Amino acid sequence: MKRRGPEEIGVTVFYTETVLPALVERLDDAFPEFGWRRDPRGWVATNEEHTHARLGVRAERVVAHGPAPRGFLIHGGDPMLWTAYVCGGGVPRGREFVRAVEEIARRAGVDPSPIERAAPHDRQADVLEDFFSLCRRELLSHGGGTAREYLERRGFPGEAIETSGLGFVPPVGRVREALGLYRGAEIDEAGIVADSRWPGRLCGAWRNEYGRIGTLWARAIGDVTAADTRYLYLSGASRTNLPPYGVSDLRTNSRDARRELVLVEGFMDLHQLHARGIENVAALGGTSTSPRTFERLDWLGIDVVTLCLDRDDAGRAATARAVEHSARARQSPEVYVIDPECLAPAKDPDALVRELGPDAWHRLSEKRTCGTAWRAQEFARTVSRDSPAPERRAALARSGRWLGTLPARLALEQEDAIHLIAERCGYSSEAVTRSLRARFWGAREREGQPFSPRFVDQALER
């Protein structure tokens, strides 16, 4: 087991001895979404809509019993820590734990300032922030002229470069000089001078949900660099536990302003759209997603996600995987898809708005379709009503196997998808439903099998 540092132990004592006793006295105010009411042993939830949507259970099964419970219990299921709940489900460690305790303290009406005294200042975080501030200034300085010209050639409005959120990496000597308040070892440990290829590149800060820099990326100016080295990342920093790039910018928006989000692939897609006043966008920084991606977005209050990935084979495959991951998530926003072919003749959102302007983006957004229906039709994309019967039936089988793995929360999307694939293959939706239930869903329904990632993997491998 990993040993905790003294700062985390100090925060833990404050949390258990001060925050939790205060929290249990005002749980209904601290977490009103549960609709807590008191019972003889503590608290029981009453908000059926929230517990069903977030946890998939009836409200009366969610309880917080005891003098100072560390979390809530789902009868017949697993407990969840308050610190995990405010972090979207994952148990936080280190600085994430400290920030979770600060959040819970505020909810409990406890002054969180002792937490800052218990946890020493994060010097490495300061190094990263100051380094990126230096890069932002460098982009606007004489030394950043080449980078500004490059952005203008890419269609960035000149007045938008200053507020673009981008930086330009200066030479190592200038970095060390500008960050002279830090020891050389601190600069080296932060990883910002570890790669000699960084100077002369554009850069951006990839932040976590709390607005702290998790890693930095550096992009070569121009497109002559090999694809696998066009983007470099901060040495020693992981991207695995970060939300999509740009999501942290939505933290200060109102709840209504961040209900809908478009996910694109590339960093430059996002910055190009932002430069044109299109704000509700985040980037994957590639093609990778996981169920956790969508659980994080749900926790952050995103109700609707639209996938708009690149018009190539990789983008199409990544779109399919993303829809599958959203279905496997414990909770997920509604997912829609803009079919990659709708970007034609452009390859990606960056090129679309560069060549056709922001109005083309707004027209494109109107072409989104239900993600579940899109994925089901992808299994049958190569067939039509005129295809030979064996090909049509094989396509229905591929779609049906996947549709049978969906959780109950996607029942309506499943039904819509059945209608569409039945029409594509030239059968009635009633006949298709009976066939799929008999061939693929019946045994699972009779056995009462719950939705599980392993079942999905088995189904897709058949």
Image (tube, rainbow, N blue to C red):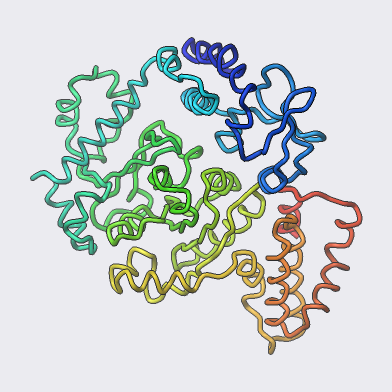
Front-most of residues 340 and 416: 416
Residue at x 33% of width, y 54% of height: 226
Residue at x 62% of width, y 40% of height: 33
Q: Position of residue 204 (x, y in %)?
A: 31, 44
Q: Residue lying furthest bottom in this view?
A: 386
Position of 7 with respect to 40 (left or right) is left
Position of 165 with respect to 388 (left or right) is left
**Residue 321 visible in the snapshot:** no
Q: Position of residue 36 (x, y in %)?
A: 69, 34
Position of 452 with respect to 307 (left or right) is right
Q: In the rendered view of the protein, which quadrant contains the C terminus? A: bottom right
Q: Position of residue 346 (x, y in %)?
A: 37, 72
Residue at x 43% of width, y 58% of height: 264
Residue at x 49% of width, y 74% of height: 367
Q: Position of residue 19 (x, y in %)?
A: 56, 18
Image: 402 above or below 39: below
Position of 268 with respect to 312 (left or right) is left
Image: 287 above or below 234: below
Q: Residue lying furthest right in this view?
A: 446
Front-most of residues 147 and 20: 20
**Residue 250 visible in the snapshot:** yes
Give the mark count: 0
Front-most of residues 2 and 458: 2
Q: In the rendered view of the protein, which quadrant contains the N terminus? A: top right
Which quarter of the figure has residue 436? bottom right
Which quarter of the figure has residue 176? top left
Image: 444 above or below 137: below
Which quarter of the figure has residue 46? top right
Image: 27 above or below 323: above
